[in-house]
Image (cartoon, rainbow, N blue to C red):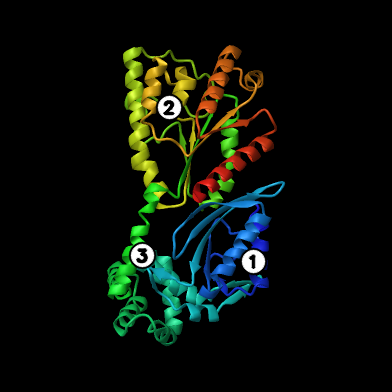
Amino acid sequence: MNNEQFLIPFFNEMSLNNIRYCVLRNYEKLPKSLDGSDLDILIDKVDVNVFYEILNRVIIETNGKIIIRYGKLTPRICIAGHNSSSWYGIQLDVHEGILPYKTTNMFPIDYLLMRVNTHNTILVANNDDANLIAFLKEILHNRCCKEKYFEAAKETWTKNKFHYTDVLLSIYDNKFIEMLTVTLEGHYIKSNISELAKYGQSLLTQGIITKVNNLISKSSRFYRFIKTPGFSIAVLGTDGAGKTTIINAIRDPLNEAVHNSLYYEHMRPNLIPNIAQLFGKEQQSGPVTNPHSSDPSGFAGSLLRLFYYSFDYIIGYWMKVYPVKVKKSSIWIFDRYYYDYLIDPKRARINLPTWIIKGIKFFIPKPDLVLCLGTEPEVIHNRKPELPLDQVTEQVKKLKLFNENDSNSVWVDTGKTLDESVQKALEIIVNKMSLKIRK
C-alpha cells in the first residue's frame, strides 16, 4: 500500500489554504501512513466548502475516486486510487464543525481547534482533549467503553479537572460534571459508566427542536436500506483463469479503502453448512485439484442440492450480507457464485435441465458487480491441466455468453501479465462503485 501518494498532497493543500482543522486520533505515522486506521478529521464549519474543494482536487490529481460516501453530520468517505506502480485506499470520517451525539455537539469545537498541536506539519488534537473526547464518544454512543478509554480519560481528568469542568459546562450541567468526576476518580465500574452515559444522553437530546432534528436525521438513514453503502462482487472463472491470485491481489487496497470491512466468501454466503458437513464429512482444504472427481447426483439429489444451496444464497444474503451492507462501508467478495451452476454444474454435482437452474436464478440476490475472468482456453489449460481442453473450452464459451447477457458483468482478460489483470480488475471495481454513489 502506498497511501502517502494521497496523504502528502492532501495535507500540503490543507496547509496552503489555511484550513482550520485537526486530526482527532491515530496520527502517529502521518503523512506517510495511516497504519491501518481511518482518517478521523474535524473541519471548522466555515472551512467545510473549501475543504471539499481541496479533497476533490487531490482525488483527481492522485487518480482516485470516491467509492463509498454516506452520512450527513459526519460523512464517511472511502477513496481508492493509484499511480503507475501501486494503489492506495483511504477512509475519511469528516466531522463538519461538530463532534456529534445524534445532532448535538458533545465537545466545544472552538476550544478544541484553539489547542491543536503540530505533528509532522499536520494539525492534530491536543492529547488530553483527544482522550476526553474518545471517552465521551464511546459512552454516549454505546453506554459503555473499553478500559483503555477510561484509563486515558481518568489520567486527563486527574490532571485537569477544574479546567475541563469550566470547558464542559458550556454543554453539560453540574450534575453531569459531578457524575463524571465520581466515575473518573474511581475504578473502572461499568454500572457507573452506564449511568453517566444515560444522563449525558438525556441532556443532549432534550428540547423539541433537538428531538425534531434527531428524528429527521434518523429517518434519513432509511435511505441506506434502498441504496446500501456496502458493495458486493462475484468473481467467476474456470480453474486456471487466475481467480484466487487476482482476488488476493485486489483485497489489500479495497480493504484499506473500507477500513478493514472487506469480507470474503467462497461460492455463497455460507450462513448454513454445506451438505457434506451435515453428514460429518471432512472438507478439502486448499485448492481443488480435481473439481470433477465426484459424479453428479441424480435428478432428485441434484434438485435437493440446488434448493438447499439456493436457500443459503437467499436467506444468507438477507440475514448475513445485506445487514452489513446497510450498516457500514463494506465490500463483499464472492469467489464463484450461483452463476457457476450454469457454467460448470458438474463441479457442484448438479445434473439438471438448464431451465430449472435459470428459473431459480431469478430469486437469487444479484451482486453489484460480476467479474468474469478468462482468456484463451489453451492458456488456461496450460496453467491448470486437470480438466480436458474441450471442457475448459466449453466453460470459457459459457462464461463469455453469460458475460454478454448479464448487465452487471464485466470481462477481464487474464491472459496478460498479473499486474495488468489486477490493474484492470481494480479499475473496473472502483469505476463501478464510483458510479453507484452518483446515481
Is label 1 in a helix, a strand or a loop? helix
Q: Amino acid at mark 2?
A: Gln
Q: Up-down: is 403 above or below 214?
A: above
Q: Amino acid at mark 3?
A: His
Circle 3 residue: 141
Give residue 219's position: percent from left, percent from top: 33, 59
The image quarter containing residue 430 is: top right
Q: Amino acid at mark 1?
A: Phe
- The residue positioned 44% from the left and 69% from the top of the image is 134
Circle 1 residue: 11
As drawn, the label of residue 283 is: 2
Give residue 57's position: percent from left, percent from top: 64, 60
Alpha-carbon neighbours of circle 1 within 10 Å: few (<14), some, or many (≥20)? many
Q: Is residue 142 among what the camera can see?
A: no
- Distance, label 3 to label 1, CA atoms, is 30 Å
Lower sequence index among marks 2 and 3:
3
Mark nearer the viewer, 3 or 1: 1
Give residue 299's position: percent from left, percent from top: 34, 13
Using the image as rendered, state which of residue 289 and residue 372 is in the foreground. 372
Using the image as rendered, state which of residue 262 and residue 399 is in the foreground. 399
- The residue positioned 36% from the left and 65% from the top of the image is 141
Q: Up-down: is 374 above or below 257?
A: above
- Distance, label 2 to label 1, CA atoms, is 50 Å
- The residue positioned 60% from the left and 35% from the top of the image is 246
Is label 3 in a helix, a strand or a loop? helix
